[in-house]
Amino acid sequence: MPTTHSGEVLAVTDATFEREVLAGDLPVLVDFWAQWCPPCHRIAPILDEIARERAGSLTIRKLNTDENALTPRDYQVMSLPTLILFRDGQPVWTLVGARPKARLLAELDEALGR
């Protein structure tokens, strides 16, 4: 099943990660988060905005690390929030911690070569 480009930040799990992230036809930014993490909640609306603004050129997904332990382990996620950008099934950029929208977009655009 191909990744949708609706501009929504949808959840992925350990079971769906390969299909929804690694096999995606667009770059995919994954937000590794947890319910107990205040910075995760601060960055969530920013990621929602970016997902809508970049629909068609970037997909954003979120993975709850408390409910899905295998994928964070595989990508050595040690702090939350951690954002990892995947392109062609490979991690190409990692950001740890929350950022204001303008700074996050600047860093993301640099990673995407824009």
Image (spheres, grey):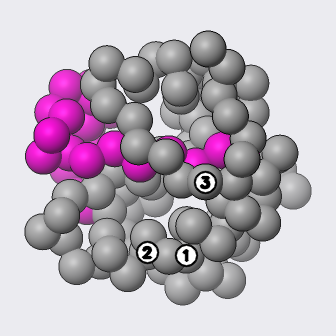
Q: Position of residue 9 (x, y in %)?
A: 54, 53
Range shown magenta: 58-80
Badge nearest the viewer, 3 or 1: 3
Which residue occupies the foreground of this view, 29 or 79? Answer: 29
Upstream in sequence: badge 3 or badge 1: 3
Badge nearest the viewer, 2 or 3: 3
Q: Position of residue 28 (x, y in %)?
A: 61, 39
Which residue occupies the foreground of this view, 92 or 43? Answer: 43
* Amino acid at pointer 2: Ile
Does the CB distance between marks 3 and 1 fall below 8 Å? Answer: no
Q: Is residue 24 magenta?
A: no
- Cα separation, mark 3 vs mark 1, equals 12 Å
Instruction: Look at 33% across and 50% down and name the residue there.
Output: 32
Q: Position of residue 19 (x, y in %)?
A: 51, 17
Q: In the rendered view of the protein, which quadrant contains the N terminus?
A: top right
* SS state under label 1: helix
- Cα separation, mark 2 vs mark 1, equals 5 Å
Return the residue at label 2. 43
* SS state under label 2: helix
Q: Is residue 74 magenta?
A: yes
Q: Is residue 7 left or right of residue 85?
A: right
Instruction: Give the quadrant of residue 56.
Output: top right
Which residue occupies the foreground of this view, 2 or 78? Answer: 2
Residue 8 numbered mark, or none: 3
- Within 10 Å of disc 3 (Cα), the crowding (few <14, some 14-19, many 20+) is some
Return the residue at label 1. 46
Say above or below: 85 vs 75: below
Question: Residue 88: in sight, yes or no?
Answer: no
Instruction: Look at 29% across and 25% down and name the residue there.
Output: 14
